Amino acid sequence: MRDAIQAGTISLTGDGGDEIDAYLAHPLDGTPSGGVVVIHHMPGFDEGTKEIVRRFATWGYAAICPHLHFRDAPGADPDDAAAASRAAGGVPDDRFVGDVAAAVSYLRSRPASNGKVGSIGYCSGGRQSVLAACRLSLDAAVDCYGAFVVGTPPEGFPLQVTPLYDVLPQLSCPLLGLFGVEDSYPSPDQVAELDQLLTEHGKEHEFHSYDNAGHAFFAVDRPSYRPAAAVDGWQRVAEFFGRHLAG
């Protein structure tokens, strides 16, 4: 654990040269370390997500979270920006990949970087973490209950998302998946389907599903929070990134 970190909002040149906000946290001791791109959930660039970014800094990583909804409502609070993004059909995949590519490049360019970068995402960000690992060269990726990596959205779903069947063969790094047995999106059957597909594609992955947990079991400020699942999940994330990003 690192006692001293620095954290705050920076400007990041994202997809298409757009300047967007991003939240950065890093240790102050300068020891070379890996980086983590934190991909926020659909509710957006909120305090819970920033706390996660700071957690990775205390673990010794430089961590950054691009504000994926920034263009939809510059200067707005996270709830309003998320609402504007939903009204627009969500974050387009290509724009998302461009923003994360910029975040990865930023982390790798830091003097204290060891060159390794991973991603982690929650809810819609879980799907996006897998997408980033398929479209970009990463060293590790974590999917926390990401919906529609496989399977199709229900009728009337507000976001314009499609499953990732076509890009899964290009997964560039090991993948850790953390899921709730009581979740509907992704359901246990969808998790099993993804597991089978990645095995068929010869992709290194490990999945863990938690009983008595549904969607958003990591979210400490929501009724869905499940402490036992979250504590075990954080331990697995620490071990996973320790294997693939540290050193």
Image (cartoon, grey):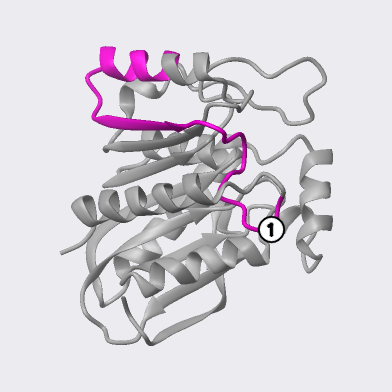
Q: Vertically, is 126 above or below 109?
A: above
| Quarter of the rendering containing residue 85 | top right
Task: Please tell me which residue lies in front, 39 or 169.
Answer: 39
How far across and how far down the image is residue 108, in percent? 30, 64
- In the foreground, 124 or 170: 124
31, above or below 157, in the image: below
Relative horizontal placement of residue 4, taking residue 82 as reference (left or right): left
The residue sitting at 33% across, 48% down in the picture is 236
Q: Is residue 196 in the magenta section? A: yes
**Residue 138 visible in image:** no
Q: Which residue is nearer to you in this view: 101 or 151?
A: 151
Q: Position of residue 16 (x, y in %)?
A: 57, 52
The part of the image, by quadrant, that contains residue 51 is bottom right
Residue interval drawn in magenta? 193-222
Q: Name which residue lies at 80% across and 65% down.
A: 77
Image height of 234 relative to 94, above or below: below
Classify the position of the N terminus by image quarter.
bottom left
Q: Residue at x 65, y 27 (%)?
A: 161
Quarter of the image that includes the C terminus: bottom left
The residue tagged 1 is 221
What SS does tag 1 mark?
loop
Look at the image and tell me whether residue 7 can be seen. yes
Left or right position of 156 against 33: right
Image-quadrant location for residue 60: bottom left
Q: For the point 83% across and 48% down, which residue is it?
A: 83
Question: Across the whole image, how many numbered discs are drawn on residues?
Answer: 1
| Residue 114: percent from left, percent from top | 20, 66
Mark 1 residue type = Asp
How would you rate the neighbour count of disc 1 (Cα within 10 Å): few for under 14, some for 14-19, many for 20 or more? few
In the image, residue 209 lies in the stretch drawn in magenta: yes
Where does residue 134 sit, x and y in percent of width and height? 38, 33
